[in-house]
Image: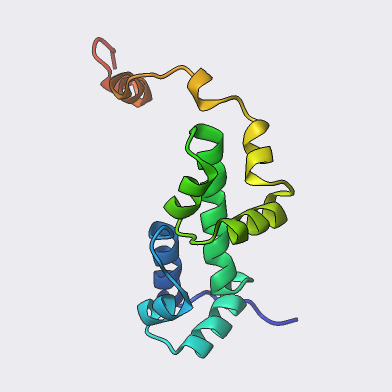
Amino acid sequence: MIPTVAPGRQLLRAKDLADSRYFEPLDVAALARAARLSQAHFSREFRRAFGESPHQYLLTRRLERAAALLRTTDRSVADICITVGLRSIGSFTTSFRRAFGQSPTEYRAAYPPAAHRARVPICLMAAHARPASSRAGARP
């Protein structure tokens, strides 16, 4: 059994970059530069620390975001593909099916259309999300 080692700061920096800027044209080279490691060493260490390759991790983040957009918006599959940082609709559909077991269109069909959801003004959501003690008229 290989002992688990806490990931170094440089790997976390690259992982945070993938999480926050997944929609940009990032690749393993860009992530390795962010970690200040060579591509080969970065890929080995990333896989050892997080259990998947940097490319697979970035693709997973993009597909998760695409799934959220499919559930909550009426945007086209092509638009969502580009929005999450992927360039090929065919590759997107294939990867999505591999990850979720169905095509993006089939996945979307399993959820109610976004137009049927009630829209709540952001000011009401923000007020409701505040702790009771900070709402107007609340008593400590």
**Horizontal side, residue 49 vs residue 12: left or right:** right
Residue at 43% x, 51% y: name it: 83
- Depth check: 51 or 61 in front? 61
Residue 61 at x, y percent in the picture? 53, 57
Asked if residue 129 is positioned above or below residue 83 in the image, the reply reads above
Residue 42 at x, y percent in the picture? 49, 83
- Depth check: 77 or 72 in front? 77
> Which quadrant of the view contains residue 137?
top left
Residue 1 at x, y percent in the picture? 75, 81
State the count of labels. Answer: 0
Asked if residue 140 is positioned above or below residue 46 in the image, the reply reads above
Asked if residue 128 is positioned above or below residue 37 in the image, the reply reads above
Residue at 29% x, 17% y: name it: 140
Indicate how the structure is coloured in the image: rainbow
- Depth check: 115 or 99 in front? 115
**Horizontal side, residue 100 vs residue 89: left or right:** right
Residue at 46% x, 17% y: name it: 118
Residue 39 at x, y percent in the picture? 48, 86
- Depth check: 128 or 38 in front? 38
Q: What residue occupies the far top of the structure in this picture?
A: 137
